[in-house]
Image (cartoon, helix red, strand yellow):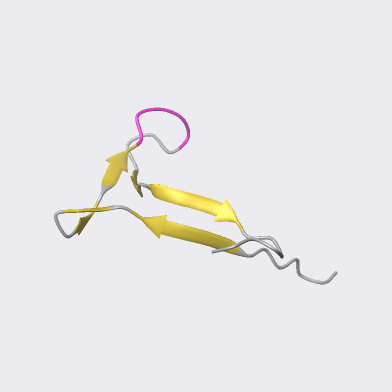
């Protein structure tokens, strides 16, 4: 089976020169840290 290629675009928010991270408070990943920002799927014809 051929692999599916998924193109994504992401950005990270910086505050005072440091990446802004948040801690999850519920769910499967509770107490894990994540970088806040925007994640989206890129499709042909989108402008970056």
Task: Name the one closer to the observer, 46 or 8.
Answer: 46
Left or right: residue 28 versus residue 22 is right
Residue at 29 percent across and 41 percent down: it is: 22
* Furthest residue toward left: 16
Residue 30 is one of the magenta-drawn residues:
no
Classify the position of the C terminus by image quarter. bottom right
Main SS of residues in magenta: loop
Rendering quarter of residue 19: bottom left
Residue at image point 38% right, 34% down: 30
Q: Which residues are magenta?
A: 24-28
Rendered-image quadrant of the N terminus: bottom right
| Residue 39 falls left or right of residue 11 | right
The residue positioned 82% from the left and 72% from the top of the image is 2
User: Percent from the top left, x then y, of residue 37?
Assistant: 39, 49
* Residue at image point 71% right, 65% down: 44
Asked where in the image residue 14 lies, by quadrant, the reply is bottom left
Q: In x, y percent, where is residue 39?
A: 50, 52
Task: Point out residue 18 in the picture as x, y percentages from the top left corner.
Answer: 19, 57
User: Relative to 24, is 19 above or below?
Assistant: below
Seen in the picture, residue 2 relative to 20 is either above or below; the reply is below
* Camera-side residue of 5 and 29: 5
The answer to whether 31 appears left or right of 26 in the picture is left
Verify whether residue 26 appears in magenta.
yes
**Residue at the extreme top:** 26
**Relative to residue 45, is residue 20 drawn left or right?**
left
| Of 27 and 6, the residue lying toward us | 6
Q: Nearer the viewer, residue 17 or 2?
A: 17
Q: Residue most toward the bottom?
A: 2
């Amino acid at each position: 089976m051929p692999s599916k290629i998924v193109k994504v675009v992401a950005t990270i928010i910086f505050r005072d020169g440091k990446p802004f991270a948040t801690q999850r408070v519920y769910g499967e990943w509770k107490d894990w840290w994540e970088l806040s920002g925007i994640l989206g799927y890129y499709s042909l014809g989108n402008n970056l």
